Amino acid sequence: MAGRFGYRWALYAAIAAMMACAIMEAAVAAPEAFPVATEVRLGGDDKETRFVVDLTRKVEIRAFTLADPYRVVIDLPQVTFALPARAGETGRGLVRAFRFGLIMQGGSRIVLDVGKPVRVEKAFVLDAGQGQPARLVLDLSAIDRDTFMRNLAQDNRAPRPGAQRPAPARQASADTRPLVVIDPGHGGLDTGTKGPAGEMEKTIVLEFATLLRDQIEKGGKYRTMMTRADDTFIPLGDRVRFARDHQASLFISVHADYLARAEGDARGATIYTLSETASDSDAARLADDENRADVIAGLDLSQETGDVADILIDLAQRETKVFSTHFARTLAGEMKGAVRLHKNPLRAAGFKVLRAPDVPSVLLELGYVSNRDDLKLLNSTAWRSRAAESIVAAIDRFFATRIAGSAPAAVPPVVPGVQGAIEARR
């Protein structure tokens, strides 16, 4: 008997050793999925500054400048950023601060805030060798604004690869259930607000949005899609286009707010709809902060439109606003019985992400990460579940007429000619 057990243990040990060797060989043989940025440093003064990032392997990069505010953008393939904590919060020389992160699957971006007009003198990546890592090197020099603007105009003559994403063709889905698009705010190098211990808004809202999606789909009444399902930066305009291109019946953008102690200790959820005139100073402040997301990512998404297009889009948007306001009130009513609301829970401001002219849209601030009690709830599984269930109940009430087979009261009519005007804006 003892011999049999001894044989078995010897066999198990041999198998374990073989498996360990196989795992080690696979780890050595398999290349890293993505290059890793391990260290970053700045050197120089307010005339010339060098920015260096250590990488595990060489990558291709492209650097360009943007104005108002002055920024330098470095686009590179997808990189895993393993930089020291608080990297980028302070700068040196011409660079005031910098941010980094994923902007799309397969693509990362570094954005440097600079205090004055600059020129990119050099932008290259050195091969790893002689015990040193691969190195991304960016050399900047100070120039006057006129020269900067001339360089910028020349750089913008040719389209930047990847700067524009082709919009998918509109196709009617065979599934006739209403589509609810959930938009977790921020992502990638745009972290959103941060809590006292470094809790990031982008992570909090993505986790909640995923739970909300699952709760909505559980009932089987609606289709759902998310503008992002991972830590990816999505420009505000792309979020709006995503909802429109998929012919969404409802768009819910999920965020969490922050107030400095000097501004008060506000609590509770708030629901926003679109308005060019903010309902109050807090709404105006929040809309301005949220609308800066594209600037944070180093993008310029300003667009010009003709007068006729503006008029047609305005007509459609007026109809959509009615439905958006209706859903916002319904949502406030349902959430009131489940979670704490702000003392003024229904507000309006000029959020770019709510500008789809033919998709009812709201922006939901779940609470304040700056408030200790709110932050505790935002991280509570029980609270998240109650909040998500109340949102599903509001969606049910909003679509009740359509689900019953009557007129589609939750879907605004399309004003004749508006579709072409909207497409012309792209």
Image (tube, helix red, strand yellow):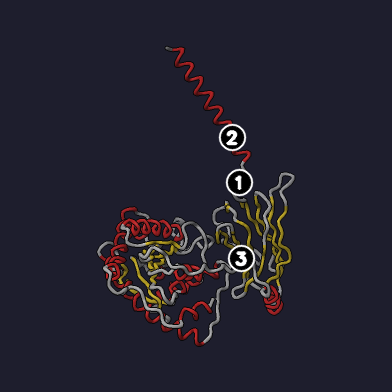
Q: Residue at x 39, y 82 (%)?
A: 318
Q: Are marks 2 and 3 in contact (CB under 8 Å)?
A: no
Q: Distance between the Cα atoms at labels 2 and 3?
A: 38 Å
Residue 230 drawn above or below residue 420:
above
Instruction: Please report whichever mark, 2 or 3, sits nearer to the chain's N-terminal start.
Output: 2
| Mark toward the viewer: 2 or 3 | 3
Relative placement, left or right, of 394 versus 209 is: left
In percent of width and height, residue 29 lies at 63, 39
What residue is disc 2 on?
Answer: 24
> Which of the two residues, 237 or 94, is positioned nearer the viewer here?
237
> Which of the two residues, 222 or 70, is positioned nearer the viewer here?
222
**Label ID, residue 202:** none
The secondary element bearing badge 2 is classed as helix
How many C-alpha atoms fall within 10 Å of the one at disc 1: few (<14), some, or many (≥20)?
Answer: few
User: Quadrant of the image for the N terminus?
Assistant: top left
User: Quadrant of the image for the C terminus?
Assistant: bottom right
In percent of width and height, residue 189 lies at 54, 61
Q: Residue at x 73, y 46 (%)?
A: 129
Q: Residue at x 60, y 68 (%)?
A: 163
Q: Say which quarter of the image contains residue 78.
A: bottom right
Q: Say which quarter of the image contains residue 71.
A: bottom right
Q: Are marks 3 and 1 in contact (CB under 8 Å)?
A: no
Q: Residue furthest bottom?
A: 307
What residue is disc 1 on?
Answer: 32
What residue is disc 3 on?
Answer: 162
Q: Can residue 367 be seen from the camera position used here?
A: no
In percent of width and height, residue 286 lies at 43, 72
Instruction: Please report whichever mark, 3 or 1, sits nearer to the chain's N-terminal start.
Output: 1
How many C-alpha atoms fall within 10 Å of the one at disc 3: few (<14), some, or many (≥20)?
Answer: few
Badge 1 amino acid: Glu
In percent of width and height, residue 146 lies at 70, 80
Badge 2 amino acid: Met
